[in-house]
Amino acid sequence: MTAPLVVFFGLAALAVIGAVSLILQKHPIHSALSLIVVMVALAGLYLLMGAEFVAAVQIIVYGGAIMVLFVFVIMLLNAGVEEHTSLSKMAGPPGLLLVLALAGFIAATVARSGASVQAATQTGALSSTKGISEMVFKDFVYPFELTSFLVLVAILGATVLAHREKS
């Protein structure tokens, strides 16, 4: 195995472990820390693909600003360890079967698509900052503004929930 392949598998394993930890944590702050691990692992994968700008944005925006926002909301809502409940009936064998079926479907779809690593990494225009900015501010300006609006709505919703808890 080559060094980039070993690094890829290491970062992919770190992202999966962080995601599983995110789901299994009982305390919301620990879940937020697990999400930071996932964000850093994804940034490493972006670096491995030669998208340095996207990796930097991943760390600064998602690993930094959005996670600070999440932790701020968790603190405002005074979210702690929730009361323990018994697992639902879907969490047992039927849930495992559903996860395995979904994973098999995704693997079969990827195998049939004929996509290759070379095709995914030869996107020249998207790896430059100029190409990304032209796409975001020319081709995808409406989805970009819609996403900004959704973030604003989430911030306002968190503020409303925090004020409701105090009164």
Image (cartoon, helix red, strand yellow):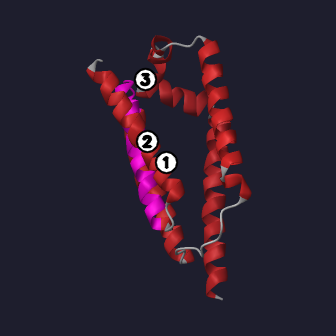
The three-letter code of the residue at mark 1 reads Ala
Secondary structure at badge 1 equals helix
Residue type at numbered disc 3: Ser
Q: CA distance from mark 3 to mark 1?
A: 26 Å
> How far, Cα to Cα, is label 2 from label 1?
6 Å
Where residue 123 appears, as percent x and y from the top left, is 48, 16
Q: Quadrant of residue 82?
A: bottom right
Magenta stretch, overall SS? helix
The residue to which callout 2 is attached is: 15
Left or right: 102 as drawn, with respect to 24: right
Mark 3, secondary structure of its residue: helix
C-alpha separation, residue under disc 2 versus residue under disc 3: 22 Å
> Height in image: 165 above or below 135?
below
Q: Nearer the N terminus, badge 3 or badge 1?
A: 1
Q: Is residue 112 left or right of residue 20?
A: right
Question: Mark 3 highlights which residue?
Answer: 127
Residue 145: give x, y in percent of width and height: 64, 44
**How crowded is the residue under tag 1: few (<14 C-alpha within 10 Å), some, or many (20+)?**
some
Looking at the image, which residue sits at the far front? 93
Instruction: Give the residue drawn at x 51%, y 66%.
Output: 26
Q: Quadrant of the N terminus?
A: top left
The residue to which callout 1 is attached is 19
Q: Magenta stretch: residue 41 in it?
A: yes
- Disc 2 marks a residue whose amino acid type is Ala
